[in-house]
Image (cartoon, rainbow, N blue to C red):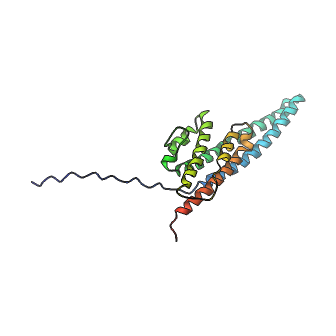
């Protein structure tokens, strides 16, 4: 009989290094384009609403009033759908940026080690999503500043700009006309920081 082989000794396996990915610039640009179109539709929607209200004050016939009311409702729906699509693209960018942070730096307030999946999932919870997104922005800004200590980069982290973009997004009207473009400024500057970090990690040629 052959002797039994000795039991294999468990060897601890080092955790894989954190892999950085390029920022989701395409999603950010699509969100910006959709936001511009949403603003255009909302402006025409406002014109239709004023026209419908003026005809109503003049007690216009229903067949004259109805087309303007219909135009208002259709344009409003299109503007809302465009902003929803832009918000989804913004979440794609947010997920990529959050996943580029090392695990210990993914903090949202008192919650530590927040996965990118959880970060996006909570963003769909009504009411909580507004405060949660603000926490994500603060977490991203603090995370990039922590990265700077061991991987220096020159660009400033626009923490206050990101917070302003989220807070302005809480205000009806401003969430269509101003907040998306503040968000674009914030996201673009974060992408610049990310590209500098990626460049510093590349081996010299």
Q: How far across and how far down the image is residue 2, in percent?
A: 11, 55
Q: Is residue 110 left or right of residue 48?
A: left
Q: How far across and how far down the image is residue 135, in percent?
A: 59, 40
- At horizontal 58% and vertical 55% (from top left) the residue drawn is 23
Residue 198 seen by the camera: yes
Q: Is residue 1 left or right of residue 169?
A: left
Position of residue 166 relative to residue 148, above or below, is: above
- At horizontal 68% and vertical 47% (from top left) the residue drawn is 161
Q: How far across and how far down the image is residue 114, in percent?
A: 50, 42
Position of residue 24 relative to residue 200, above or below, is: above
> In this view, which residue lies farthest toward the bottom?
205
In the picture, residue 39 is in which quadrant?
A: top right
Position of residue 152 relative to residue 129, above or below, is: below
Q: Quadrant of the N terminus?
A: bottom left
Q: Is residue 193 left or right of residue 164?
A: left
- At horizontal 54% and vertical 55% (from top left) the residue drawn is 149
């Amino acid at each position: 009989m052959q002797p039994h082989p000795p039991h294999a000794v468990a060897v601890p396996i080092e955790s894989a290094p954190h892999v950085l990915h390029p920022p989701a610039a395409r999603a950010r640009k699509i969100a910006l384009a959709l936001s511009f179109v949403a603003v255009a539709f909302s402006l025409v929607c406002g014109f239709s609403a004023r026209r419908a209200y003026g005809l109503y004050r003049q007690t216009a016939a229903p067949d004259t009033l109805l087309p303007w009311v219909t135009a208002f409702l259709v344009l409003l729906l299109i503007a809302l759908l465009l902003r929803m699509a832009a918000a989804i693209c913004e979440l794609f960018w947010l997920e990529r940026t959050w996943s580029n942070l090392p695990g210990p730096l993914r903090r949202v307030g008192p919650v530590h080690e927040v996965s990118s999946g959880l970060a996006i999932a909570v963003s769909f919870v009504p009411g909580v999503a507004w405060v949660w997104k603000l926490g994500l922005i603060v977490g991203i800004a603090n995370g990039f500043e922590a990265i700077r200590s061991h991987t220096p980069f020159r660009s400033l982290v626009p923490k206050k700009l990101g917070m302003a973009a989220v807070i302005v997004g809480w205000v009806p009207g401003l969430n269509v006309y101003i907040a998306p473009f503040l968000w674009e400024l914030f996201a673009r500057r974060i992408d610049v920081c990310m590209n500098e970090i990626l460049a510093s990690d590349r081996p010299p040629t």
